[in-house]
Amino acid sequence: MIRLNLSNRPEWLDLLPGLRIKLAPLTTALMVAARADPALSALPDTARAEDMALAMAKAVARLAILEWEGVGDDNGDPLPLSPAGIDALLEVWPVFEAFQAQYVARGLMLDQEKRLRALAEWSFGGGDGYCAACSGPCPDCPARLNQPQTVEGWQVWDLTQRLGGQLRIAPGAIIGWDMGTALSLAQALGVNTPIAAELLPEIEAVMVRKLNDALRSGSLQGHDP
């Protein structure tokens, strides 16, 4: 279900006790502009998921933060809002985590669903085997183009790779994952459970379709429903 926030007014967000920021509405235009930030395109292909998530959060924050309260220098004097100051603020882990969860993740949820569905189409459709035989990184590789853009997205995708033993199987068909066990595992691994509950069914639907197609064609190895 898509939940629409029809307000176009800036809102204050409390990040930590004594620290709050005034944010512009999280619009498509803002997210598109953030993705065009040179800092993102400058990241190497080997950049870690954490580095990509931080770069994206900083790009969004530089566009979205209109005012702040509770930010000071070494002497405790209030600091004026600046791009460099925003970058420094996002380097503080609790601030980054709160900003990511309370603001950025809302805008990226639909994008993450799209990316993870495409990644699942590739992976469960035999793409992993293709990549294993590839001589080097391909610029148009679906696994690369559809990689998650947030830490939560990477965590959910990693979680799906751990669910091979949690398949629910009926005679002649794969039904899905044991979702209760999957969410319990997500919680144990420290994955954001509400986000996992939102994204896992999207991936599961693709997984079920692809694996059942492979079953019917006789190309699926390691399962005997």
Image: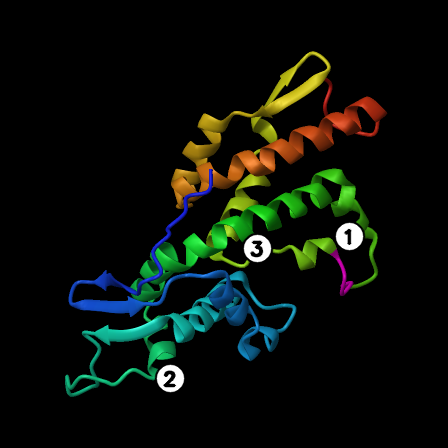
Q: Residue at x 53, y 42 (%)?
A: 159
Q: Locate residue 78, reporting x and y percent.
A: 18, 84
Distance of mark 2 from mark 3, alpha carbons?
Answer: 26 Å
Label 3: which secondary element: loop
Q: Which residue is mark 3?
A: 148
Of labels 2 and 1, the one closer to you: 2
Compare residues 165 and 98 and report the one nearer the observer.
98
Q: Which residue is mark 2?
A: 84
Choose the circle earlier in sequence order: 2 or 3.
2
Q: Is residue 59 left or right of residue 71?
A: right
Classify 97 as above or below 205: below
Classify 32 as above or below 198: below
| Circle 2: residue type | Ala
Classify 77 as above or below 205: below
Q: Residues within 10 Å of mark 1 (few under 14, many from 20)?
A: some
Please provide the residue range marked out in magenta: 137-141
Q: Residues within 10 Å of mark 3 (few under 14, many from 20)?
A: many
Q: Residue at x 77, y 52 (%)?
A: 131
Q: Main secondary structure of the magenta part?
A: loop
Q: Which residue is mark 1?
A: 131
Choose the circle earlier in sequence order: 2 or 1.
2
Residue 76 on the magenta span:
no
Counting the numbered discs, the total is: 3
